[in-house]
Structures are given as C-alpha cells and as structure tokens.
Image (tube, coloured by chain):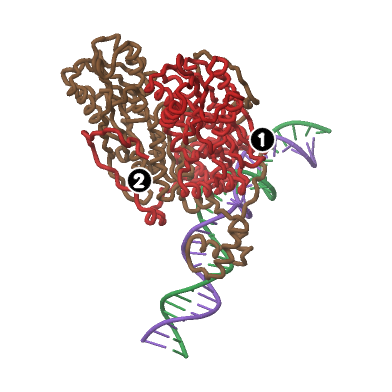
Chain colours: A red, B brown, C green, D purple
DNA sequence: CGGAAATGTGTGCACGTGCACACATTCCTT
DNA sequence: AAGGAATGTGTGCACGTGCACACATTTCCG
C-alpha cells in the first residue's frame, strides 16, 4: 500500500496540519443528522411564477405545443429561480437515469501501473457523452465496496454497466445476471454468461504474432515473463506464446509473476537469466513488465536488442519511455472503451447484443527493442 | 489524441470486427425508444407476499417495532423475490443519495502521465466507503461534459462533490456555488470562494525546500522546468523556486512548458541546455518532467548527478523507474483524497467546514539524482 | 381496576417528475 | 356552414419510498 516503502527517506520538511483520522466503521455507518438541504425550485414554483400550469412547464422541457409567450415567461422564470430538473424524480418516473456505470474492479495496481484503464475510461466517456449519457465510475477494492456497488447498480441510479477487469467468479457477475442489468465486459472472465457481450482483443493471436516476430528475427532461446494467470488476458497471452514457439517451447523459460507491473518485470527477468543465461529473446506480458526486464538486463550487463530481444504488450506510455523503445502490440484502449459503451447503449435501445464478443484489431508496433 | 502518432508501425495482424462508428450527435441526442425494463419487486410486492402492510416492510428496513414472525415472513419474501430498494425513490423522498461525486477536470493527460489522480481517487473512495457513501467519479473533457455533469451534480443523484484540478474561472466552480452543493477542492484555483474548503500541499514551501537542497549540495547554475502556469500548483512551485534562489535566480533559466508530462520534460531540458550549457542543477515541476529531463541530458551526454543534479516533484512511480532514481517531494496523494472526502462528509453532517484549506505534509525524498 | 406506557400494525401523504386525458380555441377543408 | 384537424392549456395519476399519524393490543404500576 505504501508509495514509498523501503527507500531511504529523510523528512526535512513538514508543512501544515495532518488531516483528521478516518472514523471507525461502527460510528460512521449510523444515519447522519439531516440539516435541511436548501430548498430548490421545482416545476410547481416555475409554473406559479410564470402564471401557467405544471403541464406547460413540462412541455417546454420535454417538447409539445407551447405558445411563444408562455415559453418566454417560463424560460424567464426558470433562469430567475435557477431551476434545475431533479434527476432522482425523473429517474423514478421514467425508469431511466441516462447514466451508465463504469465499474473498475481491484483497480489499485491498475491505476498505478497500467495506463490502459484511463484510456478505456476516456473512450467510454466520449461515446456515452455523444449519446447524452453520464458515465459514472465506481471503484471496487474491498468486500464492503462490492456490496455497496451492487446496491448502487440495482437501485435505479444507472441504466447499465461497463465492467473492467473482472476475475473468474467475481461476485459482480452474479449481481448483474440476477438484475438482468444491460452490461458489457471488457475482457471476459471464463464463467461469464453467454448472453452478456464483451469487448476485448485477441490475446492469443496477438501474443502469437509478436512471439513469431522474435522467431523470425533469429532468436532461438526465447522466454516469457507471464503475468496475471488468474485472468483471461494472462492465460491467453501465455497460450499464444506457446503456440508460436511449437517445438521450441520450453516451460523452464516461463517466469510466472502476479501483476502486470514494473517490479514484477525486474524480478521475472532476473529469474529467467538465472535459469538460463543463454536466453536471447523475451516476451513480456506487458510494457511495464518489459520495462522492468530492460532494467534487469542492464544490471546483468546484457545489451538490447544486440544480445537479447525484448517485446512487450499494450503500447502504453511505457513503450516510448524505455531505452531502447519497445517493440510491442498496440492495444486500442480508447476504442475498447468506446466499443463497450456502444454495446451497452445498443441494449438500452432495445436491440439484442450480438452473442459473444467483439475483438478489436491489435497492430504490431516495431520499434527498437527487438 | 493518438496513442501512436508518428511511429513506424506495421499492421501485420488484424483480428475481428471493428466496432461500429460512434453516431453523430444530432442522431444520438434524440430520446431512445424505451423497451420496458424488467419489472422489479417493490415494498408493495413484499408486503403482499408476506401478508403484512407496506409500513411493516419499511420498518424492517429502517428500524422500528416489528414482531419476530412478521420479520421472518418479510425477510423470506425479500430473498424470494430478490428485493432491492430503489435508490431513486429513496433519494427523492429523503433528499439524500448517500453518494458523493469525484469530478476530474480535463483528466486526459492526468490519467496518462500522472499517477497521482488514481491514488487520490482511491484515498477518497476508501474514506467515503467507511462512511457508507458511494463515490461516483465523473470525467469532464469537453464543454458538453461540463453541461451534463452540472446537471448531474444538481439533480439529486449526489449529496456533495470532490473537485480535482480545477483551473481558474472553471465553470464548475460557479455551478457549485449556485447550487450551494457541499464540496471540497483538491488544490485551489485562485478565484475559489472563501467558504469552499480545499485540501492540498504547500507548493511554495515544498518547492523552496527541494530547491534549497540543490543549493546546499553545491549547485550554482540552477534552472527550472516550470509547467501548468495556469494552475495554482504550477505558479506556486515556480514561486518557491524563485524564493529559494534569491539573488541566484535567473529568469533565463526557467523553461515554461504546458503540461506535467514526460514529453514536456524532454523539450524543456533541451531548451535549458541550449540557453546555458553550464547549467548544473534542475528543478523539474513533476517527476514525469524530471524523467524527460534525464532523457534529454542523456542525449546531450551529461551525467546525473555528477554533471547535473535533477530533482522532481510528486514521488510518483516515475521516481523509482528512472535511472538514477529521483530525489523528489513526496505528495501524499492517498491522504489528500481521504482528507477531501472528510471535508465533504463533515458538511453533510451539518458541521461548518474550517475556512480556508488543509495543507498536508510533504517530506523530501532523497535518492540518487541530486 | 383503570389509565398510562410499551409494543405492534395499517393508512395517507409527500418527494418532483412525465404523461395520458380532458378541455378550449383557432384554422382549414369539403 | 359545419365538422374535423391543429394548436394550446390544465388536471389527475403513478413511479417507490419513508414517515407521521391513527389505531389495536398487551403489560405495568399505583
């Protein structure tokens, strides 16, 4: 959890007041006393001020026959009183909130090490925005969050949900199934229902293609730093790697690390170098891992790409920060987000989503590391 | 916008179907046809199934006298019918949604280059979660977003808001003032109202402290790569730099770049080297900028810290990825988020927020780059 | 033993909105 | 000229909930 565990650190400068401690759960769950939130103007107030009835006000808001003078009076009253329609009432009546949830599961490491989730979010937001829907993103880190978010999803505040980075047997899947909430997944946990659409990339094919690039450029002892083998993306990338190598595949040359992050890359590469110093090619399961691998290779005095070829996955900002810059698989994160949003919007329109998933193209990006 | 502009890129592998194009605004804003969303159980249904009245059901949910047998029957009915309370109705009646918005303004570059926003979000979520409130984060990138988010904030879906990275004269400030929405800002745009609380760090003091570190370690020609001079953070860091140098300050040695990102760091450092090759110390306004500066120094054949000392700001993941690792100012992002959440929760409890802002401590982190 | 307190339950209303319906006025068409 | 369309407006109801209130039954205590 600590941003700064273990580094030599000297506090020579401390400013201001520490913030009050977070209260204990027992206290904070109690109902808060309710100071009357300031009274806001309603359609009734507008109608009274403009000398018309509620219905007419409703018609200027939602369309219908309204005379020019009535419209003018109502618009004046609205701007005078600072009227804003009440979404909660509208959602209750219409059974529509015009909002879609973006649920990020266990985002801790994602936010810190994977720039993809930000791009996916922005892509989804842009698509929803065009359809005049509000994206609201919800973060799930604890069991407590799971329960609260489930309530939120089922409570009429959102019309649908985009779910990112679900693991197998994630409780949120059951919640969405039980509620029959229009949804789309980014990636697909293995136990996902057939009728829930998902969007993703062909991890197997892409991993295979980039591994083949290592083979055709003459590498012979090729290893992989595999990560997140409890997720479909991790499993599939390993499968593609294996398929590409065929008889050359050697399970001794696969290092298994938990996360897609830089630190894991350093450890994984050190591990591989120890197992077989003659290694001359590495497929890292993410760009962050590849960056870590470069660091470990530098430590070991190996040159890249001269001595060892390294390829990554994601085409994230890591790829161009490294020295040398990474050859990698481009992951169209923004498009993935936008596509997931489309899948949800289509269901909200009443259309049946295509069974199964949408796979987006993943061009290879050739740079300097292999 | 493009993740991959300008690199040599070969598409050797294309899988699946491209996702349908985003529809044009004119079409998508129209009301969607409304397929009846599946009917969900209400308190009425539960009451009927359990053979009691709505009031009794309400009492098992919200507390009150209920006999053991009635309670049992109702709980059985609730789990049979899969009852979930309707938040929209509850929010309408109670004028409380138990949700707080986390508004990220212009997050494009933040998500891609600044790991802080993720940590701030997670800190806020943790604090709100303990108080049984749902954090919903909203992204504002376009004028269209501004308008929609304003409606959302005022529509009764949230009880308060945390606002991150507002610029001066940001329209969202006016919206919050007009609505009198309980709010807290992270950082403070110069035109923020006195009575709206904010949380942040002492940018002036921290910048001054880290610049003094350069001075005391013997650097004499010290420059700065200043960024985001339209935000308080950018202005204040420059002010602290200036104050620390006193008579040594030379405005020729300040490069001005728009964003806190890596690319800006590369450009800024090249610029400084050109202006004065004898430069021997650099304060970069962020770690990402410092990382870019290291790259530019490497290009120019300068050694760090031998030839030039470099210090950053943020203590983000950038700091430990660089070679050498960065000496920098630790920004307590998680605590900032949690503190902002507390400020909002306190207002929801009816307490008056302390006037002005909370400043959190920012220890100096000494590593290898200076 | 009679009234007050404690325990348990049902009913009506309000939250703010959108829409169906009823009604009023003007205009066009056969 | 008469009847139907087009235009404009007001009223009642429902969405699902929480709470105030009225009412019923039991228990307690002077």
Toward the left, the furthest residue is B247
Residue B302 vs B60, above or below: the answer is above
Query: Chain for mark 2?
Result: B
Between A12 and A341, the residue placed more toward the observer is A12
Residue B11 appears in which quarter of the rendering?
Answer: top right
Confirm whether circles 1 and 2 share one chain: no
Q: Residues within 10 Å of mark 2 (few under 14, many from 20)?
A: many
Q: Position of residue D26 (x, y in %)?
A: 51, 80
Q: Secondary structure at mark 2?
A: helix
Distance (Cα) linking label 1 and label 2: 43 Å
Between B292 and A308, the residue placed more toward the observer is A308
Identify the residue under disc 2. Answer: B342
Residue at the spot 51% in from the left edge and 52% down from the top edge: B90
Q: Looking at the figure, which quarter contains the C terminus of chain B?
A: top left
Label 2 near label 1: C-beta < 8 Å? Answer: no
Q: Secondary structure at mark 1?
A: loop
Whether residue A121 sits left or right of residue A266 in the image: it is right
Whether residue A271 sits left or right of residue B354 in the image: it is right
Whether residue C27 sits left or right of residue B234 in the image: it is right
Between D8 and B355, the residue placed more toward the observer is B355
Q: Position of residue A17 (x, y in %)?
A: 25, 41
Query: Chain for mark 1?
Result: A
Between A150 and B363, the residue placed more toward the observer is B363
Residue at the spot 38% in from the left edge and 38% down from the top edge: B177
Q: Position of residue A356 (x, y in %)?
A: 66, 35
Identify the residue under disc 1. Answer: A356
Q: Residues within 10 Å of mark 1 (few under 14, many from 20)?
A: some
User: Could one spot residue B106 in this view of the protein?
Assistant: no
Q: Nearest to the eye among marks 1 and 2: give it.
A: 1
User: Which label is found at residue A157?
Assistant: none
Residue A211 vs A261, above or below: the answer is above
Q: Position of residue B172 (x, y in %)?
A: 41, 34
């Amino acid at each position: 959890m600590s941003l700064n565990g273990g580094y030599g650190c000297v506090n020579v400068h401390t400013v201001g007041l520490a913030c009050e401690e977070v209260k204990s759960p027992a206290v904070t769950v109690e109902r808060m006393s309710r100071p009357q939130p300031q009274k806001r103007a309603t359609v009734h107030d507008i109608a009274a001020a403009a000398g018309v009835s509620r219905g007419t006000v409703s018609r200027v808001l939602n369309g219908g026959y309204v005379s020019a003078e009535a419209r003018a009076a109502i618009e004046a009253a609205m701007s005078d009183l600072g009227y804003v329609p009440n979404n909660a009432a509208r959602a209750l009546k219409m059974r529509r909130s015009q909002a879609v949830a973006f649920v990020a599961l266990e985002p801790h490491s994602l936010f810190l090490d994977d720039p993809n989730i930000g791009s996916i979010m922005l892509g989804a937001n842009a698509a929803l925005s065009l359809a005049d829907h509000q994206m609201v993103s919800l973060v799930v880190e604890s069991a407590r969050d799971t329960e609260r978010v489930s309530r939120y999803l089922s409570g009429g505040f959102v019309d649908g949900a985009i779910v990112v980075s679900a693991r197998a047997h994630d409780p949120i899947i059951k919640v969405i199934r039980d509620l029959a909430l229009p949804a789309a997944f980014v990636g697909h946990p293995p136990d996902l229902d057939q009728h829930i659409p998902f969007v993703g990339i062909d991890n197997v094919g892409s991993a295979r293609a980039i591994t083949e690039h290592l083979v055709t450029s003459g590498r012979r002892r090729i290893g992989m730093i595999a990560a997140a083998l409890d997720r479909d993306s991790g499993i599939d990338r390993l499968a593609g790697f294996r398929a590409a190598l065929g008889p050359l595949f050697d399970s001794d040359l696969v290092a298994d690390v938990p996360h897609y992050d830089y630190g894991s890359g350093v450890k994984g590469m050190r591990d591989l170098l120890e197992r077989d110093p003659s290694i001359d090619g590495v497929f890292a399961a993410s760009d962050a891992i590849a960056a870590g691998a470069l660091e470990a290779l530098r430590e070991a005095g190996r040159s890249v790409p001269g001595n060892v070829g390294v390829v990554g996955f994601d085409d994230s900002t890591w790829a161009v920060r490294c020295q040398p810059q990474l050859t990698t698989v481009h992951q169209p994160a923004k498009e993935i987000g936008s596509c997931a949003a489309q899948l949800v919007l289509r269901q909200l329109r009443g259309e049946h989503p295509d069974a199964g998933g949408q796979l987006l193209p993943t061009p290879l990006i050739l740079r300097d590391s292999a």
